[in-house]
Image (spheres, rainbow, N blue to C red):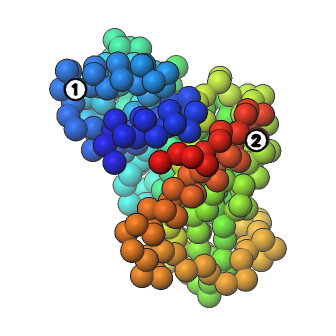
């Protein structure tokens, strides 16, 4: 799917904008291409958001400049490094990331573009708060992903309560759960069909967040969380028994009785995979429209 196709798809679904989650989704970072993409989005009445990963200063500076040309006020990024196994090493990692982010701030100031650090599967809520506190800038906040707290064995609603005041943009995502002998697995699903209390999170965001864009994120995949394996748990030295117990109770009480077979596991064709992905997107758009009290788009005749 080209960027232009992506924009037209969003417009056909009567969405407000699109999130380009990585620079690889742009054909070029040249000014002419990027400004033309901004003009195309404007013609369709869409906002644009730009994302990337990591804290490399040079790369982030390029993304901030590109975001400025695109008309984006936020660049999403995340801490994408292997988690150390000790609390001291985690603190050193966060300090290094904070130092790199601070090098990007002059460019952010120049172009009026903020950095939104995602609560990624590598970062706990407390760690993300510590990182942002260390950087200490009005131009650094949070990209809150509604389902990612489950990746670090946290309650999504509790994470939303802690991070909402810093949220500059949001990824609306849901997961189903299924128990495994070594812990549990996260299964991507349409919004509203998983275990994340999205309505409670939307209420928290409405009360405390500075009007971030709500970007629908769908994921037809599976991620294993070996929460009962010693080697895995040592990567979260500050996680309490209460946090782990709460997550395992959620798996017990709301987990699926058996793992669903993903399209790739069923040997589905490319057309079948794309159709299932499209269905996941449409179901999520309908759920979000209802939850936000917006007219649900009539998508029955869309190509």
SS of the residue under disc 2: helix
Q: Position of residue 60 (x, y in %)?
A: 31, 33
Decide: is 68 above or below 203. above
Of 89 and 116, nearer the camera is 116
Q: Quadrant of residue 74?
A: top left
SS of the residue under disc 1: helix
Residue at image point 39% right, 74% down: 269
Decide: is 61 above or below 123. above
Q: Is residue 177 visible?
A: yes
Q: Is residue 296 left or right of residue 173?
A: right
List the residue tagged with mark 2.
290
Residue at image point 60% right, 28% down: 212
Question: Which residue is at the far front?
Answer: 301
Point out the tag, 2 or 1, that comes first from the N-terminus. 1
Residue at image point 66% right, 67% down: 176
Callout 1: 10 Å neighbours few (<14), some, many (20+)? some
How many marks overall? Answer: 2
Q: Is residue 183 visible?
A: no
Q: Position of residue 220 (x, y in %)?
A: 51, 64
Residue at image point 42% right, 47% down: 79
Q: Which mark is residue 33?
A: 1
Q: Position of residue 302 (x, y in %)?
A: 53, 45
Disc 2 to disc 1, C-alpha distance: 36 Å
Q: Position of residue 298 (x, y in %)?
A: 65, 41
Q: Is residue 104 left or right of residue 255?
A: left
């Amino acid at each position: 799917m080209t960027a232009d196709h992506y924009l037209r798809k969003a417009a056909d679904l009567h969405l407000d904008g699109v999130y380009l989650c990585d620079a690889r989704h742009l054909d070029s970072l040249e000014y002419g291409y990027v400004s033309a993409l901004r003009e195309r989005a404007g013609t369709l009445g869409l906002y644009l958001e730009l994302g990337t990963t990591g804290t490399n200063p040079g790369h982030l500076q390029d993304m901030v400049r590109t975001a400025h040309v695109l008309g984006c006020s936020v660049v999403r990024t995340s801490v994408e490094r292997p988690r150390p196994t000790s609390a001291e090493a985690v603190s050193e990692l966060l300090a290094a990331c904070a130092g790199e982010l601070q090098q990007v701030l002059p460019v952010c100031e120049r172009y009026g573009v903020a950095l939104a650090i995602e609560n990624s599967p590598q970062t706990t809520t407390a760690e993300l708060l510590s990182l942002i506190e260390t950087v200490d800038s009005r131009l650094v906040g949070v990209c809150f992903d509604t389902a990612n707290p489950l990746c670090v064995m946290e309650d999504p609603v509790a994470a939303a309560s802690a991070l909402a005041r810093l949220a500059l943009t949001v990824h609306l995502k849901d997961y189903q759960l299924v128990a495994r002998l070594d812990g549990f697995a996260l299964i991507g699903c349409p919004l509203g069909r998983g275990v994340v209390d999205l309505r409670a999170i939307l209420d928290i965001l409405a009360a405390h967040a500075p009007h971030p864009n709500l970007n629908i994120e769908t994921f037809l995949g599976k991620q294993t969380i070996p929460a009962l394996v010693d080697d895995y748990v040592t990567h979260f030295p500050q996680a309490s028994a209460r946090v782990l117990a709460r997550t395992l109770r959620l798996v017990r009480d709301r987990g699926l009785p058996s793992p669903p077979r993903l399209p790739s596991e069923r040997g589905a064709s490319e057309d079948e995979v794309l159709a299932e992905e499209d269905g996941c997107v449409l179901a999520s758009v309908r759920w979000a429209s209802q939850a936000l009290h917006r007219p649900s788009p009539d998508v029955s005749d869309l190509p």
